[in-house]
Image (cartoon, helix red, strand yellow):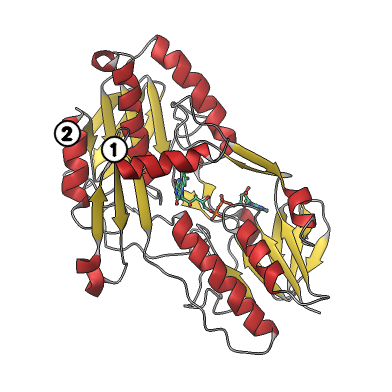
Amino acid sequence: MAQVVIIGGGTAGLPAAYELAELARPGERITVVADRASFRSGTPAPWVTALGSVEFDLAQNLRRRGIGFTAAGARRLYPERRQLELGDGKRLDYDFLVIAAGPRPAFEEIQGLGPRGYTHSLCHADHVAGCVRDWHRFVADPGPIVVGAVQGATCFAPAYESAFHMERELRARKLLDRAPITFVTPEPYIGHLGVDGIGDSRARLESALRALGIGWIADARVERIERGRMHVTEAGSGRTHALPFRYSVMMPPFRGIEAVAGIEGLTDARGFILIDEFLRNPKYPEIYAAGVTVASAAASATCVAALAHRTAYLIESMVSAVARNIRDAIDGNAPGAGAEWNPVHLADLGASGLAFVADPAPSLRPAHGVAAGDWVQMSRCSACDLAH
Ligand SMILES: Cc1cc2nc3c(=O)[nH]c(=O)nc-3n(C[C@H](O)[C@H](O)[C@H](O)COP(=O)(O)OP(=O)(O)OC[C@H]3O[C@@H](n4cnc5c(N)ncnc54)[C@H](O)[C@@H]3O)c2cc1C
C-alpha cells in the first residue's frame, strides 16, 4: 500500500495532507513531517495591534483525519533510496514525497540583516514578537524608518503593505513628521512585484507612495546593515546611500531547506525544488513540490535578483494538482493536472487596497488587471477577523 510523506505543516503542506487523505483508499498511509507541533501564522502587520495570530495543534487535527504526524523535522533526504531522515534520527520510507517546506530566510547573506542583526522580519511567526516589541519602543521615541525587501526576496506585497500600514499608524499617532519612511526594493521599478509589473501597478503604487510622502529607492542592493544605518547601492547607476533608521523591516532573500540542499537534479542553485508542469521533479518523478519551495525563474531579467511571489491562491492550486497527480500515479495513470499560475494579490494599503491578477505568460499580458478600492482592504481585514 502506498506511503505518501509530506515535508512541511504550513500553508501548502496541510491542505496537501487533507486533499490526499480525501482521495486515499483504505490502507494507504499519509504522514506529515513538520518541524514544530503547532501551526502558527503571524499577523501580516504586527504594528496594527488589533490583528492577532492563528495557532492550533497539528497532531490533534491531522490524526483526527487519519493522517500520521511527526514534529521531528526533515533532516536529510535520500531520494535514491526513497527515504527521509528525521531530526530524531528515525528514517521514513516513502513511495511518494511532497516537499512543502516553504522558504528558509537566508539572513546570513547580508551582514546585519534579520532578527539577529538590526532589521526585523515578518517571514516567520517566531520573528513577529520582536517586530511588535520594538515597534512599541519605536513609537515612544520615533525616528527614520527603512522598510522593503533585499535582493533575492520573493515576497514584495508584505513589504509594500508594511510601509502603508506604518504610515497609517504613524499618521494616527501624529508622529509622521518625526518618522520619515523610505521604501527600499531590489525591484527594477516600484510595482514590478517580481513579475515585471501587473497592469499599471507601477503608476498605482508610485502614486500611492508619493501621496503619502513615502520616499523610495528601487533597483537597490543592500550592501550591509549596521546599527541604525543601511548601506544601499542603486544597481544601475552605482549611486550609494547610507540610510539612517531607528526601525527597519526588510523581506530577506530566500533559500530552500537544508534537508534537500545540493541534491543534484532535485534543486536549483538556491535549493528550490525543480518541477515539471505536473509539479513533479523531472529526475525523481515520485517527488512533488508545492508552495514557496518550488523553483521559478525571474519573470524578467532584473539587475538585482527579484523573484515572483507565490501567494496562497496559487499555492492552493498547486496543492490540488499535486494531490490529483499522486492519486493518478498510485492508480497507475499518467498525471495530468497542472496549477493555475496566475497569481492573485490583494494588497492592503492601509485605508484602501489594490487587487492584482497576473498571468505569467507574456502573450496574455493584456489580461492583467489591477483594481483598487476599499473592498480590497475590507476583504483582507475580514480574513484577519476570521482568525479570532
Ligand atoms: C510575511 C509574509 C506575508 C505573506 N502574506 C501573504 C498573504 O497575505 N496572502 C498570500 O496569499 N500570501 C502571502 N504570503 C506568501 C505565501 O502565501 C506564504 O509565504 C505561505 O505561507 C507559503 O506557504 P508554504 O507552505 O510554501 O510555506 P510555509 O507556510 O512557510 O510552510 C512551510 C512549513 O514547513 C516547515 N518546515 C521548514 N523546514 C522544515 C523541515 N526541515 N522539516 C519539516 N518542516 C519544515 C516550516 O516550519 C513551515 O511550517 C506571505 C508571505 C510572507 C513571507
* Relative image position of residue 144 (x, y in whole percent): 30, 20
Element type where label 1 sits in the image: loop
Say if mark 1 contacts mark 2, CB within 8 Å.
no
Q: For residue 102, which quarter of the picture?
A: bottom right
Measuring 34% from the left and 45% from the top, which residue is drawn there?
Answer: 376
Residue 264 at least partly seen:
no
Measuring 24% from the left and 72% from the top, which residue is drawn there?
Answer: 364
* Depth check, front residue: 14 or 272: 14
Element type where label 2 sits in the image: helix
* Relative image position of residue 322 (x, y in whole percent): 58, 72
Label 1 and label 2: CA atoms lie apart by 15 Å
Q: Which residue is mark 1?
A: 352
* Relative image position of residue 49 (x, y in whole percent): 48, 24
Q: Which residue is mark 2?
A: 210
* Depth check, front residue: 313 or 227: 313
Mark 1: amino acid:
Ser
Q: Which mark is residue 223?
A: none
